Image (cartoon, rainbow, N blue to C red):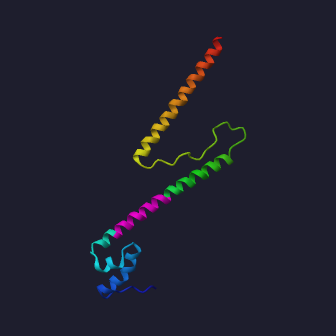
Amino acid sequence: MEEELVISSATEYLDLNCSYMMSLGMSLHDYWHGYVENDAYYIEAEQHRLHRDNVLAHRAGMYVQSAVAVIASNILRKKGDTSPIAEYPREPYPITQKELIEANKKAERRIEKKESNHIQDMQTYMRGMCR
């Protein structure tokens, strides 16, 4: 059974808390001589860093998952399968609203280009048939 930590004075609490606050980037001078309110800002900043790290880890997991899915899909592909080969994303996943809008515009342009190419191919084919 663990012993419960008993803090008998404010000084003892501050001594125990000092190394934690320094690990968050607060200087020893600011800890002992700065404004008490700064502790809350350093702790809040750490929470933001932890959240950002978690988001980055999740994003890395998305790329790993995508890579594994591409490999598995191509390895398990049956001979003679004419469906397109799975490919790893050519560009990073869009994250911000601006990136999402730009990605949608690019996708629309790709579709329009494919449609245009298809129409040109059909026109070429029809010209060949009329000769």
Query: Residue 50's x, y, as percent?
Result: 42, 65
Up/down of 2 relative to 49, above or below: below
Q: Residue 65 in magenta?
A: no
Image position of 131 with respect to 86: above or below: above
Q: Residue at x 41, y 64 (%)?
A: 49
* Label total for image: 0
Is residue 49 one of those drawn in magenta? yes
- Residue depicted at 36% across the width and 79% down the height: 28
Residue at position x 49%, y 57% in the image: 58
In the visual, does 123 lie left or right of 96?
A: right
x then y, percent, for residue 94: 46, 47
Q: Is residue 130 left or right of residue 57?
A: right
The residue under the point 32% across, 73% down is: 39
Q: Is residue 59 left or right of residue 49?
A: right
Extreme residue toward the right, this view: 79
The answer to which of 99 and 83 lies nearer the viewer is: 99
Instruction: Look at the image and give the residue range highlighted in magenta.
Output: 42-57
Picture quadrant of residue 18? bottom left
Q: Residue farthest to the top?
A: 131
- 69 above or below 19? above
* Main secondary structure type of the part rendered in magenta: helix
**Residue 22 image position (x, y, % from top left):** 39, 76
Q: Quadrant of the C terminus?
A: top right
Q: Position of residue 128 (x, y in %)?
A: 65, 15
